[in-house]
Amino acid sequence: MQRFIIIRVFYSIVVLFIVSMIVFGLARMSGDPTDVMLPLDASQEQRDALRQIWGLDKPLPVQYAKFIGNAFQGDFGDSVKWPDHTALGMVVERFPATLELAGISIVICLILSVPLGVLSAVKKDTPLDFVGKIIALLGQSLPPFWLGIVLIFVFAVNLDLLPTQGRGDVRNLILPAITLGWFPVAAMMRLVRSAMLEVLDAEYVKLARVKGIPEWKVIWKHCLRNAAIPPLTYFGIVAGQLITGAVITETVFSWPGTGLLAIDAIRARDYQVVQAVVIIFAAIFVLSNLVVDILYAYLDPRIRYT
């Protein structure tokens, strides 16, 4: 088991290293930040001086080596757009809003997808199963940005029940949480349903019923536990996606999280903030998958030897 964990940790570090190279290169391809920081009539001397201050006059390998060295120390540099803040400080300041939104979406995903998936499998080819299939189809077909706009139009503009933007009380959280969690609910529900259908036909399930074990116990304890591995694997990806993939939702609802911060930083060509956001998002995503891999190995010991 220890060897399995060490190998997975090594793979995670390699992934983060590759991500750092990609985001470093793409950030430089977005343009020169001096074009945003200086007026249009700025002289070339002013541009060169500013580039020297920010270290943009050095070769890319030197810039990358300095970036990696500082990143290991938790230093991603100072923000260009917000000069009084560090890049990491901006991410830390905005991250609680993203975590709040993603956390509520994860709760919505678990509360809805698991029961619906189990009931849809148990009641296969019934009206309940048909409703579950419709929910899954709509959930995986509707783009989040379109769904968010529709929810704003219906519940904020027409019915005037909920606010359209910003972070405040629970009312501000409802529409963006539904928008962000809609797709994972549909995907998780389909996965739980398919996994349960395979388990329900297993011999040990038939044996449990022959022994007279209550049906609810057979379904919710024996079947769901053995069908949990595929949904658990996907849940690790979903948890990472909900935290790191809130960019569109936060932009639609002007939710002041790290997703909206990333968009603002890209528009301002703020290399430091963009790099900090992407690296931290990648680390969260990799960490969530690492935890799932370890849990996966505990649930199925055969995986440790593959």
Image (tube, rainbow, N blue to C red):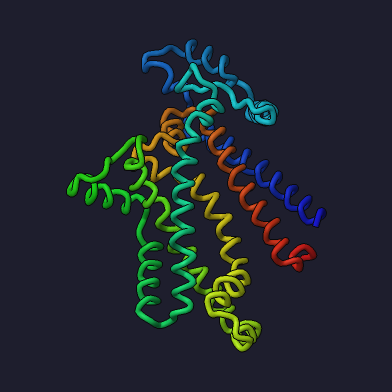
Farthest right residue? 3
**Is residue 244 depicted above or below 140 in this figure?**
above
- What is the x, y in percent for residue 115? 46, 67
Question: Looking at the figure, which quarter contains the C terminus?
Answer: bottom right
Question: Looking at the figure, which quarter contains the N terminus?
Answer: bottom right
Q: Quadrant of residue 78?
A: top right
- What is the x, y in percent for residue 47? 48, 15
- What is the x, y in percent for residue 177? 39, 48
Give me the residue at 35% from left, 70% from top: 134
Depth check, front residue: 298 or 17:
298
Q: Is residue 57 left or right of residue 104?
A: right
Give me the residue at 35% from left, 47% from top: 174
Depth check, front residue: 35 or 195:
195
Q: Is residue 200 left or right of residue 269?
A: right
Give me the residue at 56% from left, 28% from top: 88
Q: Is residue 178 left or right of residue 158?
A: right
